[in-house]
Amino acid sequence: MIRRRASLVLRYLILSDLHSNLHALVAALTAAGGLYDQIVCCGDLVGYGAHPNETVQWATKHLRRIVRGNHDKVAVGIDLPEGYNEVAKASLGWTGRILTAENRRYLEGLPRGPVAHDGFWLMHGSPIDEDLYLVSEGDARGMNRYLPGEINFFGHTHRQGGFAYFGDSLRMLAQTGQGALTHTLQLEPGMQYLINPGSTGQPRDGDARAAFCILDREANQVSFYRTEYDIEGAARSIVDAGLPELLAKRLFLGK
Ligand SMILES: [Fe+2]
């Protein structure tokens, strides 16, 4: 009998905050082609953008692990849009109405983070509260005590980078750069990492390009990437769907 060796998964494409932006998703997948073996996601598949059904359908086929985001919860009525601005409320109401029953069920079944996957962890906002924003060093200070493992990925802020902890001391990871590969982080033993791949579908760190990162377990590296995408197309889809124009305009600004 010939035994086939199970292929070893070593490279992971980490996505977050896709926000129904199919144009950005396709560009990110194209740019990451050949760089990964599996795809995982830190949540917020839907909200803001014009292609929630297409994005969820893609997720059902291609994501190996995902945690839910706050927009995923509100779109299917798990949570209320309390505290959301009018634009976000309008997009979530529209998303809730347009989602197919099958896609709604998928979103309803998404787990709360942190969730483990192959020795690393995924969460949406933070390890203690899935809806908490970790933007500054002050926000992230002390969060290491709640991290479930050494390598952790989060989203929610739509800002590429994150934090590295050595005991209780921490430093912010590099934010954006000019090239497609904005930064490579060498993972060191004894450190804890809370890494944000950035938002694929609605960046807010001043760089309008779609964001993602690659975890390479063999090289012990996380590489941060940005890629240009058809922002005009995504913006036109938002306007054509009757969604607030502000959601289209902000894509050009990356804010
Ligand atoms: Fe988000």
Image: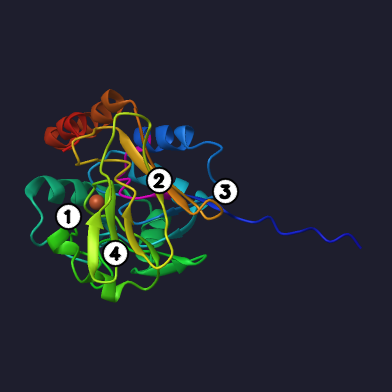
SS at mark 1 in the image: loop
- Residue at image point 24% right, 29% down: 235
Amino acid type, mark 4: Tyr
Q: CA distance from mark 3 to mark 1?
A: 29 Å
Q: Which residues are magenta?
A: 14-22
Amino acid type, mark 1: Val
Residue 253 covered by magenta stretch: no
Marks 4 and 2: CB-CB under 8 Å?
Answer: no
- Residue at image point 17% right, 37% down: 247
User: In front: mark 4 or mark 2?
Assistant: 4
User: Residue 221, how many percent across, how many down?
Assistant: 46, 50
Q: CA distance from mark 4 to mark 2?
A: 19 Å
SS at mark 3 in the image: loop
Q: What residue sits right under mark 1 in the picture?
A: 135
User: Residue 54, how many percent across, how many down?
Assistant: 40, 42
Q: Which mark is residue 165?
A: 4
Taking 58 as reference, is 7 left or right?
right
Marks 1 and 4: CB-CB under 8 Å?
Answer: no
User: In front: mark 1 or mark 4?
Assistant: 4
User: Residue 166, how many percent across, how many down?
Assistant: 30, 66
Q: What residue sits right under mark 2 in the picture?
A: 213
